[in-house]
Structures are given as C-alpha cells and as structure tokens.
Amino acid sequence: MWVDPNHKGYVVIVLVAGMYRSGSTFSFNIVKGILESRGKVHQEVGQDILAAAASSDKADHLILKSHVADEAMFRMVELGAVKAVCTVRKPEDAIASLMETFDISLHDATHQTADWIRMFSRFKKHSLVVRYEEIDTQPLKATRKIALYLYRNAGYFECRRLAAANAKSKVKEKTDSLVPGEAGVVDVKFSYYDSKTLLHRRHISSLVSRPASERIGSEAVARIRGDLKNYIDREGNLLLND
C-alpha cells in the first residue's frame, strides 16, 4: 500500500471475505463507495487476486469479493499487502438464511459455512471483523468502522450517506425489482444478481431479522450446533478468539 501526494487517499487492495449471509455484500458496497470517491475502482468476484490485479488496468483501487481463498490470497493478507474485511454472524442464523435465499439443503449450507470458518481462522488476526448484528441494527456505526479501517480521514457525513444508501429497506427495494435477463443482471442459474452491487434476488427476505429456530426449527438448529461444536460457544455464537 502506498501514498501518492496528489491522490485523495491510499491506493488499496481490499478483500471482502465475510461469512455467507452475514452482511458481506453490505460491506462490499461500503468499501466500494468509500474508494470510489478516492479514485477508479476495479471489482471482481473470485479468489484469484493475482489475476484480478492483472486485469485491473489503470484502476486506483481493487476490490475482490469471495467466500474462499487460495494460498496467494492468504499470504497477501497476512503480509498486509491486502486489507481484508470479514463480516461474521451466528452460524445457525447465517445457515438458515443461506438455505432460504438459495434453496440449498441444511447439509450443504452447514458444509459451506464450516469451510468458511476454517478459512476465517487464518484471516481473522489480520482482518477487520464486523458483526452482522452491528450492520443490522447500527448500520452507520458499521459503515464508519469499515471506512476508517480503509481511510482514516473518512468523514461522518460521507459514512452517513453510504449507510443510508445501503439501508435494508433500500436494498430490499432494489433486489425485489431485479429481473433476470435485464442489462446488468447476471444469471447464475441458482440465483441472479446485480453486477455492480452484487446484490442477489431475495437478498433481504424481511426487514426484521428472525432467529434460526423460527426459520428452520429447533431440530435443525441442534444439528448445526452439533456439527459446528468446535467453532461455537454454548449459545451458538462463533468463537472469535483462539
């Protein structure tokens, strides 16, 4: 990371690598908004940071959004060459949301979440960690945390504007109106999403968050807690400290 005295901010590479259904797309759009006001931004979805950098042309900043990582990505985050933003959520709630949003099984959703948790175990000491609950109930606070991690002079009113633009009600309006086949909408068979914001259809199912027990039942929750017992506490919260 370096500083150009004629530039509005740091030239940065950012990995947005949150848990599935934990607010990672919210954080992606906050990162993007902060950096777009400080230069040209190139964005990609995927884990190949070297290929993304090669295709970024004359962009000032690079954002990569992914839920997986290869060894090159691990090392670049560990060495501080890449800033990582990781959102986290109570696994059973994230899994319930993943099942509903993408119509996948409990087994597959739990497996994907477990894979992410193992990846996160390498990232977390070198990342900004933002809790879903903060994004859900205090979006401005979460926005400011992300903005100041990237650029220490990010302003309050800039953050307030970005938080408002990415409010749950606004996001729900946008995603409810997505139509597959329209310009800018990417169809990936199991879902479709806006190519600029990466917001999927059904991204927000409800403006009021509900616990997993109300969404998939207590039996499924018990199974999740059993499968992920090495990564959670007695209440089912993700363990963040080694």
Image (cartoon, rainbow, N blue to C red):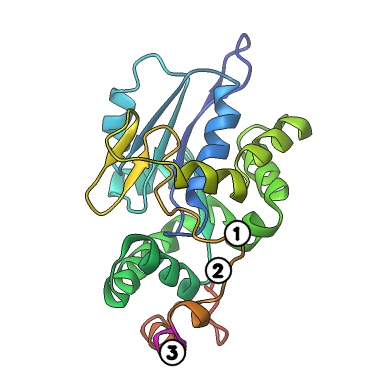
* Three-letter code for the amino acid on which mark 2 is drawn: Leu
Vertical side of 164 occupied by 210: above or below? below
Which of marks 1 and 2 precedes in the sequence?
1
Q: Which residue is mark 3?
A: 222
Vertical side of 85 occupied by 12: above or below? above
Is residue 118 or residue 192 the one in the foreground? Answer: 192
Task: Give the image location of residue 156, x and y in percent.
Answer: 77, 34
Is residue 119 or residue 193 the one in the foreground? Answer: 193
* Residue 150 location, quadrant: top right
Disc on res. 240: 2
- Nearest-to-viewer mark from 2 and 1: 1
Which region of the structure is painted magenta? 217-222
The residue drawn where x is 45% and y is 55% is 123
* Three-letter code for the amino acid on which mark 3 is drawn: Ala
Disc 1/disc 3 C-alpha distance (Å): 26 Å
- Nearest-to-viewer mark from 3 and 2: 3
Q: Which residue is mark 1?
A: 207
The residue drawn where x is 59% and y is 55% is 130
